[in-house]
Amino acid sequence: MLFIKIDQVWRSAEGEEAPRHICDGGEGLAIAYDCESGAALHVGGENAVRKWADDYRARAEGYYASTVAANDAKGAQFAQDMMQNLAVAAMPVCVKSVELINFCLANGGAIRHFIRIGKLPGPQVSGDRAAA
């Protein structure tokens, strides 16, 4: 569960003793997710999430290259899907953004629903941004 305290976003998780700092108000808040499955993959400050997404794509590209070299069509398709289905939505630090992300984390089908109604972007180029 994310929460805002003095223009900073914090995350408290079950089993953690103290909340963990996610980002300051000057940085955007972001969520990375799989557009097809609706799974939330990473949440945090915009810069950290974009770096995580770039690393995720690089790992998927490496996996794709190794599966193509091994003539593994099924594995290659899986790697392509991983790269194509990844989206990052960045938003300002505000109560509305925190509520949206918390709702997505708590409700499995929420991400796909928000994509359908245009509240979250579908597959996109890494540099695209979405407003909350």
Image (cartoon, rainbow, N blue to C red):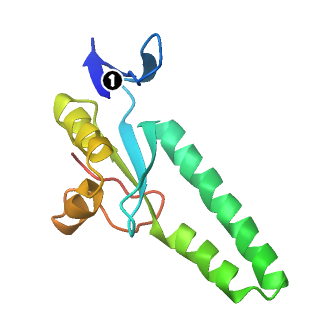
Give the residue drawn at x 15%, y 65%: 117
Q: Secondary structure at mark 1?
A: loop
Between 34 and 30, which is closer to the camera in this rendering?
Answer: 34
Q: Is residue 100 visible?
A: yes
Question: Residue 31: x percent and y percent?
Answer: 39, 46
Give the residue drawn at x 68%, y 60%: 58
Question: Residue 125: x percent and y percent?
Answer: 46, 65
Q: Quadrant of the C terminus?
A: top left
Q: Is residue 23 left or right of residue 81?
A: left
The image quadrant that residue 60 belongs to is bottom right
Give the residue drawn at x 69%, y 68%: 61
Give the residue drawn at x 80%, y 89%: 71
Q: Is residue 55 left or right of residue 5?
A: right
Q: Amino acid at mark 1?
A: Gly
Residue, disc 1:
25
Question: Residue 110: x percent and y percent?
Answer: 24, 55
